[in-house]
Amino acid sequence: MADVLAYAEIRHGEFRPVAYEVVAAARSLADRLNGRVHALVVGPPGVGAAAADLARFGADRILVAEGESHEHYQADETVEAVASVVAGAAPAAVLFPASALGKDLSARVAAHLDLGLATEVTEMASTQRLPADRESARRRDGDDGRERRGPPRAGARNRTERPSVA
């Protein structure tokens, strides 16, 4: 099982339409991963009251960080809140809206946690179900978990081949 975290953006204490879109996208991805959707809301006191509405769009669990310090977007405090949730939940993916705030926050969180970042993603597709964890990936690839030195095994799946250029 691989869970997905969705950052639900608010403005002036209300959810923006992109908040619902990112939760719905997280639901789609989590379904393919056999996981759950965690929606994170960071905002001023009282924002948690409206957060239950995110369940209609696919959130299985709704996490709320509310306080006076979140009245307006403060990058450092919001990054800490998101990073704390990511560290605790260890999701397979974290989705942010493609808004100005989402782009700023996602880049800061990725840098803070030393993780990769893909932006402007409009669709995700896979020809096979993704493994829910490293152990199932190892079993799928016939890997016993021992460290290997030297060239990759014959038939290894994660090998990069360069096309010949004439």
Image (cartoon, helix red, strand yellow):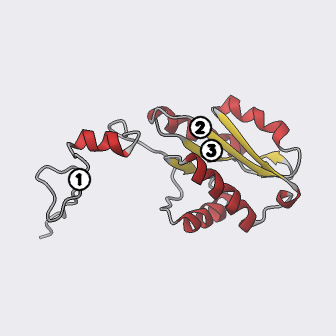
Q: Which of marks 3 and 1 is in front?
A: 1
- Which labelled disc corresponds to residue 117? none
Look at the picture and state if 87 lies above or below 141.
below
Q: Mark 3 points at which residue?
A: 22
Task: Give the number of callouts.
Answer: 3
Q: Where is residue 57 in the image (x, y as percent from the top left)?
A: 66, 32
Image coords of residue 60 (percent x, y): 63, 32
Distance between the alpha carbons at the discs numbered 2 and 1: 33 Å
Q: Which residue is drawn at 82% across and 41% down?
A: 48
Q: Residues within 10 Å of mark 1 (few under 14, many from 20)?
A: few
What amino acid type should be assigned to the residue bearing mark 1?
Answer: Arg
- In front of the other: 4 or 17: 4
Viewer-closest of 56 and 81? 81
Q: At 23% across and 53% down in the image, what residue appears?
A: 146
Residue underneath mark 1: 146
Q: What residue type is labelled 2?
A: Val
Mark yes or no: residue 78 visible. Answer: yes
